Structure formats: structure tokens, C-alpha cells
Amino acid sequence: MTAPRIAVDTTSAVPAYEQLRTQVVGLVAAGQLEPGARLPSVRQLATDLGIAPGTVGRAYRELENAGVIETRRRTGTHVAAEPPVEVKPTGDLLALAVGFVRAARAEGAGPDDILAAVGEALRQ
């Protein structure tokens, strides 16, 4: 499986840590990040996204407190072996939609493709 793409919009009114947190929750809930999957280090993800390490650290702390991820000595941060059965994003629904649209656009999807994917997801 290829690593899912995470993106942060630094111009958004939604804080970067919240964008990151909701994307990881969504990826886990959708099965795109499976239990045990290793996440990038705080420093690496911050560098990749062009944000401060403290921002990634805050998102990771909130995810760990929610039981979605766990940090293991010497092996890094992983999706929890048994993440909450029903992972419910607590963030704003618009933030989730914006994150999805940005990720879809980054993959080259156009508006019609994005709407079709949402329609299909709703039918499942």
C-alpha cells in the first residue's frame, strides 16, 4: 500500500494541527492507515509539510490521547493496534471537506471526479 498523502493549508482558518489531526483520523477510519502502520516522525512530517514541529507534536499528542496512534520507544509513532472502533472526527465538517478536496486535487482530480467520489462514498 502506498502511503496516504497528508496536506496542510497554511492559509486556512482551521489550525494546521487540527487539519493534520482530522486527516489522520479520516485515513484511519477509512482503512487507508491500518493498525500498526508507522507514521513519519514529528520532525520529518513538519519538514515535509513546511510547518513547525510543535504543530505536528500537538496533533500527534491529541491523536495519542484519543487512542488513534501510539508512540513506541525506538520504533516511532504507529496507528494504534486497536484504534477506537468508531473513530469520530471532532473537527469541523468543513475542515474535513476542505482537506479531502485539497488531497484529491493534489492527486490530479477535477471537480467532477471529486463529486463522483463523494457520491460513491455516500452510497457505500
Image (cartoon, rainbow, N blue to C red):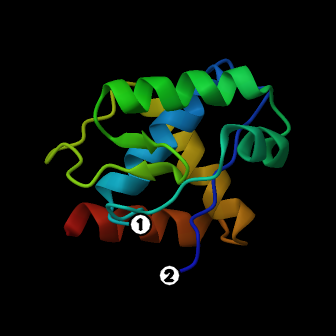
Asked if disc 2 and disc 1 are in contact, CB closer than 8 Å, the reply is yes
Q: Amino acid at mark 2?
A: Met
Look at 13% across and 48% down and name the residue there: 85
Point out the residue furthest to the left here: 85
From this view, report whether residue 56 is shown above or below residue 86: above
Camera sees residue 12: no
- Check disc 2 and report its element: helix, strand or loop: loop
The image quadrant of residue 34 is bottom left
Q: Which residue is mark 1?
A: 32
Look at 30% across and 53% down and name the residue there: 29
Residue 113 or 11: which is nearer the viewer?
11
Q: Amino acid at mark 1?
A: Gln
Which comes sooner in the sequence, label 2 or label 1? 2
Relative horizontal placement of residue 97, taking residue 3 as reference (left or right): left
Q: Which residue is mark 2?
A: 1
- Check disc 1 and report its element: helix, strand or loop: loop
